[in-house]
Amino acid sequence: MTGRRGRGVLLAGALLLAALGPAGALAASEPDKLDGSVVTPERSGARHLDVYRTGGVDYVDVNEVARIFRGTKFWRAEIEKLVLRFGDRRLKLTVGSPYVYVDEQGTNLYAPVRWIDGRIFVPMSFVTDVVDPIVPEAVAWDAVSLRLRVDSSDPNIRAIEVSARQNGVVAELRLADPLAATISVEGTRAELRIPGGVFVPGTRAAGSGGTLVRNVTTRQDGGEAVVTFELAVEDVSAETMSRTSPPRILVTFREPGGELPLPGYEGVAPSMAPRVVVVDAGHGGSDAGVSAGGALEKDVTLAMSREIARRLRDAGFTVVLTRDGDRFLSGDDRATRANTASADLFLSVHANAWFDDAMTGFSIGLPRSAGGGTGDGTFRAWGERAARTTGDEDLCAELVAESLETRLALPNRGTRRAEFAPLAGTGCAAMLLECGFLTNPVDAARLTSPDQQAAFAEAVARAIAAWRDQLEAGGTP
């Protein structure tokens, strides 16, 4: 095997005499190349994994590590250093060195980073001991079966906002699902731990903690999300409160001798207007949905759902995506996410297909019975949220259809009620939106165009915002 420049073989085992790389390849035994797999809950062993074993140490391509855990790579060839970034965590590696620096904190891997077949490889301990604690996924390596098991988790902590109040500070964590938390204070450091919490990548605290909270940082610690508050003084009192409608965690900090600062909106009666929308990207993972011309429904629905969610947030809604990646979800999973989010609207996004490629247009599906509701034409109440009626649901469908027709001049294939599987079990207003036919060339070009996806999403979001405004005004069309 050779490095990038020159010839030679690499040093085996843990013996490290000099830099192992293109500038200084040393004679050693050849590593054994083995075939392994990445195992996920969706598709067991579906992804091939190259493993190199030498001196009892298993190595894996650093590019695979970055891809599996959605990291970003920065390579400095002149000094043979690599930086991996996962969220706000930085991992620094050097070819030939057994040390990795995590945010400037050094850790010994007991085996060097290596060049193998012109690529950078890291010991498997880098994945299991260093990467595992800082990413949302849970990782396990089976050296006998050569299987790297990755159990994925969807992000459920979407934003953190800090605001200074009289005598203290309030930090609000906005969630996709209700979560509990504990907080501990030691000196000028407060640590909030959230079991089952997963940050949206790149999550940072917004707002200002005034003179009491100097800095806020986030990190993943195995199966917990951790928020650390750097305080200006000692003897600060801290309390946490969990809320389910909408889901959030509140943390209050009180200066020594001061009154506990409560958020101003606590105790205010909720508006009757819809405020929480769950956007469901149809299919996903091993369920690709329909396909035509190289386009997969699961990819189209995810792109469209992200665009719709972005515009709904801009319109002031709290939005939850049932999936924000290529992940399989059962119907029960989707309904549970809608119900635990106390959704006012569940919007399931799909693409259609037919034998005749002339078939075109969008259509809207509504559940035959109102959200699996009470049988008298109303939805079950969820928590303290006001129940919705089938009239609300019909009005939303009417406004969405009108917006798509008038804004985009799209053919409307109608709205109908039926037993749509993606809507089963939801306890709120629910709608299935077929955005067009992948089997129709014109529809397919529109559904796969980022610009057209954005225009479609804008039309849908404006309609849902109009629905909210009309219900808030008393439901008059």
Image: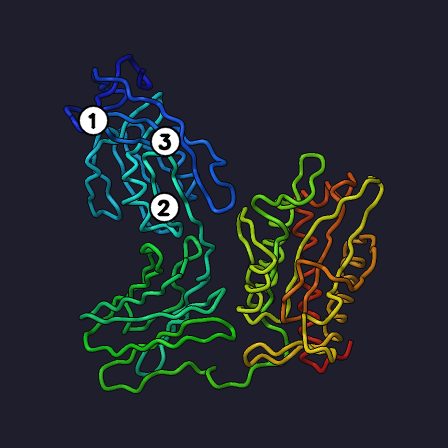
Q: 214 or 225, which is in the foreground?
A: 225
Find the distance from the CA under tag 1 to the CA under tag 3: 17 Å
| Residue position marked by numbered label 2 in the rendering | 139
Q: What residue sits 25% from the left and 31% below the top?
A: 57
Q: In which quarter of the image is the N terminus?
A: top left
Rendered view: 426 above or below 128: below
Q: Decide which of tag 1 and tag 3 comes sooner along the chain.
A: 1
Q: 16 or 313, which is in the foreground?
A: 16
Rendered view: 453 above or below 216: above
Q: Decide which of tag 2 and tag 3 comes sooner along the chain.
A: 3
* Amino acid beneath label 3: Asp
Q: 384 or 303, which is in the foreground?
A: 384
What is the secondary structure assignment of the residue under circle 2? strand
Query: In this view, which residue lies farthest toward the top?
Result: 7
Q: What residue sits 31% from the left and 18% below the top?
A: 3
Find the distance from the CA under tag 2 to the CA under tag 3: 16 Å
Q: Residue 13 carries which label?
A: 1
For residue 19, what is the image quadrant? top left
Q: Which colour scheme is used?
A: rainbow
Say if mark 2 contacts mark 3, CB within 8 Å: no
Left or right: 343, with 146 as reference point: right
Q: Quadrant of the C terminus?
A: bottom right
| Residue position marked by numbered label 3 in the rendering | 61
Residue 144 percent coordinates (x, y): 33, 34
Q: Which mark is residue 163?
A: none
Residue 359 percent coordinates (x, y): 83, 45
Query: In this view, which residue lies farthest toward the front?
Result: 144
Q: What residue sits 74% from the left and 48% below the top?
A: 352
